[in-house]
Image (spheres, rainbow, N blue to C red):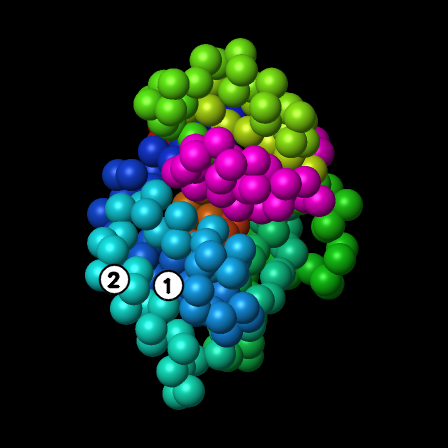
Amino acid sequence: MSGHSKWSTIKRKKGALDAKRSKIFSRVIKEISVAVKEGGNDPDGNPRLRLAVANAKGVNMPKDNIQRAISKAGEKNSADFQEVTYEAYGNFGVAMYIECLTDNTHRTVANVRSYLNKHEGKLETKGALSFLFDRKGVFTIPEKTIGEKGLEEDDFLMEVIDAGAEEAENEDGFYTIYTAMEDFGNMLKKLEEMGVEAENAELQRIPKTTVKLETEQAKKILKMVDVIEEDEDVQNVFHNMELTEEIMAGM
């Protein structure tokens, strides 16, 4: 999964350097809101909220902001967000999976369709492209966190494999662990038992096969992805374009 690991690394670095911090915080706040409405405002008794809070910490959201988001989500007049996904083809045959949290699905689908049309993409019917992606748990853990817990790498890897890790890589000072979707909860529990806090933990759409493009073609796709991701309703955009070393250098 070296290509997938590269994408996780790019997303991590991009997030760390992203000047639009408010957009990142907005995404996390929506996750917190959905989690609170789904299972209450106590992270100890609400696994989804516990995960959302952990991810908020991973993007350096201040504790006061996190607590304020939890409190606001519990108010009666707070917005109700709905999870929706859209599948699309971009230019050059690149498949995309767009995940959103929205309080107005009509606005969201209109915006997504507009972005695609402007960049020679096309919205597909629901389920049309799902066969091209596997949904997997992806955990990003700083290498130093393992050392701080006094864990040896071999022991740590054995523990996560026992918890359902399909693959674990150590690159650029971060462990990236992949699990099947059904083992996502087991891995969360195992990491909690070990006292290891992931910088980020989420379900991602991992492409089964990738499309290789020329650098200039790839730049056009990435520009479209950036435009879509800037929309307030969009949480994630996954695609099956191969990210070569040359393309990564250009980013």
219 shown above or below 248:
below
Amino acid carrying label 2: it is Asn
Residue at figure coordinates x 44%, y 64% from the top left? 42
The answer to whether 133 appears left or right of 47 in the picture is: right
In which quadrant of the rendered image does the C terminus lie? top left
**Residue placed most toward the observer, 22 or 109:** 22
User: In this view, which residue lies farthest toward the bottom?
Assistant: 77
Q: Which mark is residue 5?
A: none
Residue at figure coordinates x 66%, y 26% from the top left? 162
Q: Which mark is residue 29?
A: 1
Mark 2 and mark 1 in contact (Cβ < 8 Å)? Answer: yes
The answer to whether 201 appears left or right of 144 in the picture is: right
Please tell me how crowded label 2 is: few (under 14), some (14-19), or many (20+) other residues with Cα within 10 Å: few
Residue 54 lies in the magenta-colored region:
no
In the rendered image, which residue does mark 2 sit on? 65
Q: Which residues are magenta?
A: 181-210
Q: Estimate the x, y position of residue 219 in percent, counting from the top left.
A: 43, 37
Q: Nearer the viewer, mark 1 or mark 2?
A: 2
Residue 194 lies in the magenta-colored region:
yes
88 shown above or below 204:
below
Q: Is residue 204 visible?
A: no
Give the quarter of the image for residue 173: top left
Q: Estimate the x, y position of residue 6 in percent, counting from the top left.
A: 48, 26
Q: Is residue 39 visible?
A: yes
**Residue placed most toward the observer, 63 or 233:** 63
In which quadrant of the rendered image does the N terminus lie? top right
64 shown above or below 186:
below
Q: Estimate the x, y position of residue 9 in percent, counting from the top left.
A: 43, 29
Amino acid carrying label 1: it is Ile
